[in-house]
Image (tube, helix red, strand yellow):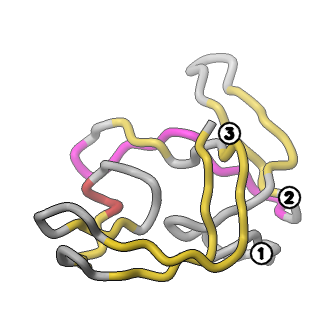
């Protein structure tokens, strides 16, 4: 998806990369919020899913690279594609890659 500017009123999508302009924390709850560059609103680092379990809302990226890479599945079993770098059920896309299948990637990230 790459590092694209965020437009006012736009919702952040799973897997979308944004530049953080500011960090703030709630003095009572300790919750941390990030204001994405070019936005007036704030996004939580953590949120509660539909079951009330805490989930990462935003993850700090240590480095991002844009380019073109091709990966091959070497696992002997299918590999599930995620919408973002998460093990959460909310990251599931329903897309599965089979053994020896190839996928093209345009953005790679190293998580902090």
Residue 58 rendering spot, x and y as whole percentages: 57, 48
Residue position marked by numbered label 1 in the rendering? 4
Residue ranking furthest to the left: 77
Question: Looking at the rendered structure, which numbered label has been put on residue 37?
Answer: 2
| Residue 82 figure quarter | bottom left
Secondary structure under the numbered disc 1 in the rendered image: loop
| Magenta highlight: main SS | loop
User: In 3D space, how far apart are the residues under numbered discs 1 and 3 (Cα atoms)?
Assistant: 20 Å
Q: From mark 2 to mark 1, how far is it between C-alphas?
A: 10 Å
User: Within the magenta stretch, is there residue 43?
Assistant: yes
The residue at 63%/36% (across/down) is: 112
Would you say 66 lies left or right of 28 here? right
Please tell me which residue lies in front, 83 or 23.
Answer: 83
Up the image or down, 35 lies above or below 71; here it is above
Mark 1 vs mark 3: in front: 1
**Left or right, 83 with reference to 18:** left
Please report the residue visible at 62 percent of the width from the left and 55 percent of the height from the top.
Answer: 109
Q: Residues within 10 Å of mark 1 (few under 14, many from 20)?
A: few
Within the magenta stretch, is there residue 101?
A: no
- Please give the range of residues in magenta: 39-51
Query: Nearer the N terminus, badge 1 or badge 3?
Result: 1
Residue nearer the viewer, 34 or 105: 105
Which residue corresponds to the image point at 72% horizontal and 49% vertical from the top-left? 63
Residue named by callout 3? 33
Which one is closest to the eye, mark 2 or mark 1? 1
Instruction: Give the answer, above or below, for where 94 lies relative to 42.
Output: below
Give the CA separation, mark 3 to mark 2.
Answer: 13 Å
For the residues labelled 3 and 2, say whether their Cβ atoms are less than 8 Å apart: no
């Amino acid at each position: 998806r790459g590092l694209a500017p965020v437009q006012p009123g736009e919702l952040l999508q799973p897997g979308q990369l944004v530049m953080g302009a500011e960090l703030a924390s709630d003095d009572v709850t300790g919750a941390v919020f990030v204001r994405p560059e070019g936005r007036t609103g704030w996004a939580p680092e953590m949120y509660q899913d539909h079951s009330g379990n805490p989930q990462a809302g935003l993850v700090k990226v240590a480095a991002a690279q844009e380019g073109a890479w091709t990966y091959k599945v070497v696992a002997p079993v299918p590999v599930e594609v995620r919408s973002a770098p998460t093990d959460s059920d909310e990251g599931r896309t329903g897309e599965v890659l089979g053994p020896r299948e190839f996928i093209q990637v345009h953005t790679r990230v190293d998580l902090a």
